[in-house]
Image (cartoon, grey):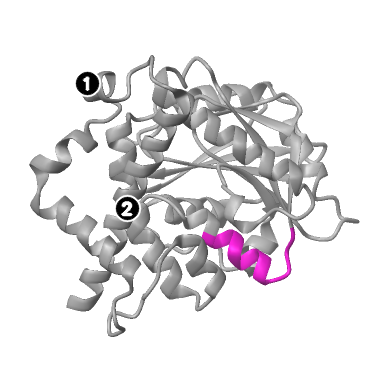
Amino acid sequence: MELTVVIPCRDGGTRLEETLDALAAARPPAGGMEVVVSDDGSRPPLAPRPRPGLPIRVVRSETPRGRAAACNRGLEAAAGRVVLVLDDDMTVSPETPAGHAGAHREELPPRAVVGRIDPDPRCFRGPFGRFLAEEERRRHDRLAARREDVAYTDCLTGHFSVLRRVLRDAGGYDEGFTGYGLEDIELAFRLRRAGVPIVYRPELAARHRSAHAGFREHCLRHLEVGAMAVRFARAHDDPGVRAFLRVDGMDPRAEPSRFRRAMARAHRLVRRSPAGLRPLLLLGGRAAAGVLGVTGPVKLRHAVYHMVRDMHFAAGVAGALERGRST
């Protein structure tokens, strides 16, 4: 088997079926293609319908364990020489699966390949949807500027391929990342550290169909990202990692830095002042119409989105630090 597409999924439903439809319609690589759906505790269990000519297997965890663990279960079941990790809301172009396999030809040195992600305009609507689409466009620009030397910080594995043996040699995903975010960037850090280059291939395209969460849910997710950032920084004693994560003073016994004190203040706001935080949590919902408004300057809206999201990230970091001191 040449290519295994691993799709981690929890309660995917229609999203997953659309992703499988696109894979079934795509041109497979010469050595064949299979799909492994890794069901992360969905209720009811996932049961994708068969597609003629496309082998589909489902591996399942009875309880949700997070995306990292789901990816690893899919990797364990994979038979392909190349593994393409794909989120359950991606529509690949017809040539993308074969293109990923070709990017890992035997005569080429091992590498990880990041494919292009195009936000579906039908899904990324409204002020906040356009903000997310603009963030993806900027990421594309950074990737295009470093096609043969992608920074680990830009390696998101929602559309990502690598030789199966390389991924296994790297230890797979760190299953300690049970919350939202950073499990893919941490994997990319380890791949780069092991000497595996990361390249960008914009001709390998997928359309991101996600009906994204509102800004309130986005911010709450970044509380989890902050907690995962603490795990990342503690796992790797690397100044570059700490600088990227904006995490300072990681040792709970150390004298708190100014940034850490600011994070602690943000965390206290989340814990103790729900009424004061409520307007920020509602940004992107009803309050967004009055606070940001579709008629407001785009740059100002985006700056506010960044500011409030970063505040939640900082609160997540501070909360993880406090929990670390109490254990």
- Residue 117 is situated, as x and y percent measured from the top left of the image, at 62, 33
Q: Residue at x 62, y 64 (%)?
A: 168
- Label tally: 2
Residue 42 seen: no
- For disc 2, the marked residue is 224
Q: Quadrant of the C terminus?
A: bottom left
Density class for disc 1 (Cα within 10 Å; few <14, some 14-19, many ≥20) is: few
Q: Residue at x 26, y 25 (%)?
A: 291
Secondary-structure class at tag 1: helix
Q: Is residue 287 magenta?
A: no
Disc assigned to residue 286: 1
Q: Which residues are magenta?
A: 186-197
Taking 25 as reference, is 279 above or below it? below
Q: Nearer the viewer, mark 1 or mark 2?
A: 1
Does the residue at mark 1 contact the one at mark 2 (Cβ under 8 Å)? no
Q: Is residue 192 magenta?
A: yes
Taking 230 as reference, is 118 above or below it? above
Drawn side of residue 96 relative to residue 242, left or right: right
Disc assigned to residue 115: none
In the image, 207 versus 16, the foreground residue is 207
Q: Amino acid at mark 1?
A: Arg
Q: Residue at x 41, y 66 (%)?
A: 247
In the image, 253 versus 39, the foreground residue is 253
Q: Residue at x 77, y 47 (%)?
A: 147
